[in-house]
Amino acid sequence: MAATAPADDRPDNCPSAAAASSPPQPTPEELVARAVAPVKPAFLRPPPVREAPSEENRATGAVPLEKKSKRQFKRERKQESVSRLCIAVGKSGNPDACKYGASCRFSHDIDAYLAQKPADLEGSCPFTVQDKLCPYGLNCRFLGTHKDNNALSENHEINPLNKDVQKLLWKTKYKFPKASAQIKHLGLKEVIKTKANAQTEDQKADHDNLDVSCELNGDDKTESLSGPPVNLDCDSGLCEEMVKLEGEPLVGNSVPCVEPRASKKSKVEDGGIHKNGAGTHDTTTYSEDSALVNGLEVPSDDPSSCRVDLVETPHLRERKIIDFREKLYLAPLTTVGNLPFRRLCKTLGADITCGEMAMCTNLMQGQASEWALLRRHSSEDLFGVQICGAFPDTVARTVELVDNECSFDFIDINMGCPIDVVVNKGAGSQLLTKPMRIKSIVQASSAVTERPLTVKVRTAFFEGRNRADSLVSDIYDWGASAITIHGRSRQQRYSKLADWDYIYQCAQKAPDDLHVIGNGDIFSYTDWNRHVSGCSKISTCMIARGALIKPWIFTEIKEQKDWDITSGERFNILKDFAHFGLEHWGSDSKGVETTRHFLLEWLSYTCRYIPVGLLDVVPQRLNWRPPSYCGRDDLETLMASDSAADWVRISEMLLGKVPEGFTFAPKHKSNAYDRAENG
């Protein structure tokens, strides 16, 4: 399919192919065979000449030569706090509004703060535009646009971390009755390594007599990823129940069912999104004689017992069922798949969104930065959270924790992440080498939640030793509702195209009621159509890097066209992201710079997009390397640059000048075509 563009679309400063003294250009077919984007010769230009950084520049560049010490970070934070106005004072305009008074680490001197505050940014406050009161007050970088309005701004974000829950996690006093019961039922060990759970010799003897495996001696010691494991004060009650119920299953759906499965529902049942963290489909009723532990029902006369009600635990086929078929699924994306980006993709046509991958250990520790990855916007009507862990007890407890405290529609367990720091801990794609551990994780996790559980895997850990096909036939009986297969191995990373033939083979082996979702190299509506129709067992396709490079891919799929988007339309999309980012991270100086950081991370991907009107062959393929070219206008040329300095220029058009001494280096090697760091 050929796309043509008028000759006068070429900018005056773009040298033509005839003007350049170069050998004859290869044909589009030859370029495609070499995985080079066939840009029209009229738009090609010589690669820009960039000076190699000097030793001095390297020392002061974006990538530091050595890490800063904790003392340096502490000193910088202290200096920063002195120059920042207290949030309470800035919001009210009253120096006495702060409840901490003189002990507050932020400044209360309004006049001094306003004297050194940078000039306001161009544009309007994102909260004032909605006729709401800006929560940042005098700290806002759009202070001049504020209006006299007392209406509080409505928070459309869900799943904040409750401070009381955070304190319980810090003190390792959060209880996990369902996870503990299921881990015990499966015969798995719970490794507890915390002083809060140290017991006296008499208590240890009692536990030994009751056959509880809580010791950490000799060869029985198992390495767990759960940093601060939970305090199971009610283990003794659980053990008494276990003695009485020897041989009786504690959870009804922890063993494969021999009855035929019920067919899938055609549509997902709508449920309200509650902001109290109770979940979207919480219909649990509590009996008068039941006890509550962390908001959970413990149906026993003894409130200290952790026995799970055997009757009310739903079977897999009785759970909420999500119909993934032919829905546009935005993949969970590390760093760039943040809440503002997902919100942007929703406006462009995405149906299903999923939060960034959160590590189970960090969630169990109550880390606010990790819990922020679970935040959900009210526009995300079909939303999942993704977690990653290495051991059944860690993952099951995290599932129970998130199920109790967050609102979501499904939970996804990442078993395909290729990052070294994750793999070295036994999580992510490392689990593909341990199928029995995968079975234990899925069985234990699916038993502690009524929401659908999904799993994301790669084809294998090592190239040429595929393992995913051996999982799909059994993973439904273990408790998973859907499995996403990324058509690459961990060893392969992104060095080759995704193996969709193998994804089809896996889908053919899957039970009828298991949703199989394909993932890899979806970059146009033709890619989507080909892979969805390539196998009737494929429910849908997950879109990852294609959405990062051009988030309007969801619009293209729904409208079934290759959108020749203009630079102005692309810039408006960047504007929307900046607006959403200021709402999410804040309109004060810190929020502006956080928004800028994530905007620059995203721009490190968008520069790979080549406008449709500049190509001899459309649609663009994900593995094509863009040559050096100029766009149809200066803005389009700027957006095509792979230089971080040009990305910073684009950010300054949206968020004002960068601070003095600002540097940036992308976290992920997004412009590398032979390897990538995020999965």
Image: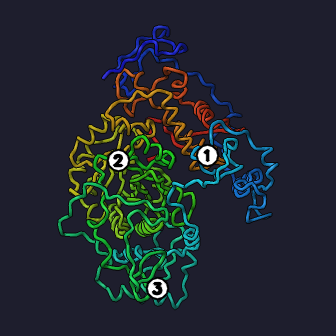
> For the residue marked with disc 3, what is the amino acid?
Ser
Q: Are marks 3 and 2 in contact (CB under 8 Å)?
A: no
User: In the depicted view, which residue is nearer to us: 133 or 476?
Assistant: 133
Residue beneath label 3, please? 304
Q: Determine if residue 47 is in view.
A: yes
Residue 240 image-quadrant placement: bottom left
Of labels 2 and 1, earlier in sequence is 1
From the viewer's perspective, tell me whether residue 44 is left or right of residue 263. Answer: right
Where residue 583 sits: x, y (%)? 57, 48
The circle drawn on residue 486 is: 2
Q: What label does residue 101 carry, if any?
A: none
Kindly check if marks 2 and 1 are in contact, taking CB atoms under 8 A apart as contact: no
Rounded to the nearest angstrom, the CA distance separating label 3 from label 2 is 44 Å
The kind of secondary structure element at disc 1 is helix
Element under disc 2: strand
Q: Is 49 situated above or below 382?
A: above
Q: Is residue 242 above or below residue 106?
A: below
Q: Nearer the viewer, mark 3 or mark 2?
A: 3
Q: Residue at x 63, y 28 (%)?
A: 52
Tell me how far mark 1 sits from mark 3, CA to CA: 51 Å
Amino acid under disc 1 = Thr
How packed mark 1 is, by other alpha carbons closer than 10 Å (few <14, some 14-19, many 20 or more), is: some
Q: Quadrant of the N terminus?
A: top left
- Looking at numbered disc 2 in the image, what kind of residue is underneath it? His
Residue found at x 43% / y 51%: 380
| Upstream in sequence: badge 1 or badge 3 | 1
Mark 3 Cα-neighbour bin, 10 Å: few <14, some 14–19, many ≥20 = some
Residue ID for mark 1: 128
Give the mark, 3 or 2, whose residue is nearer the N terminus: 3
Task: Describe residue 421's horizontal placement relative to residue 468 as left or right.
Answer: right
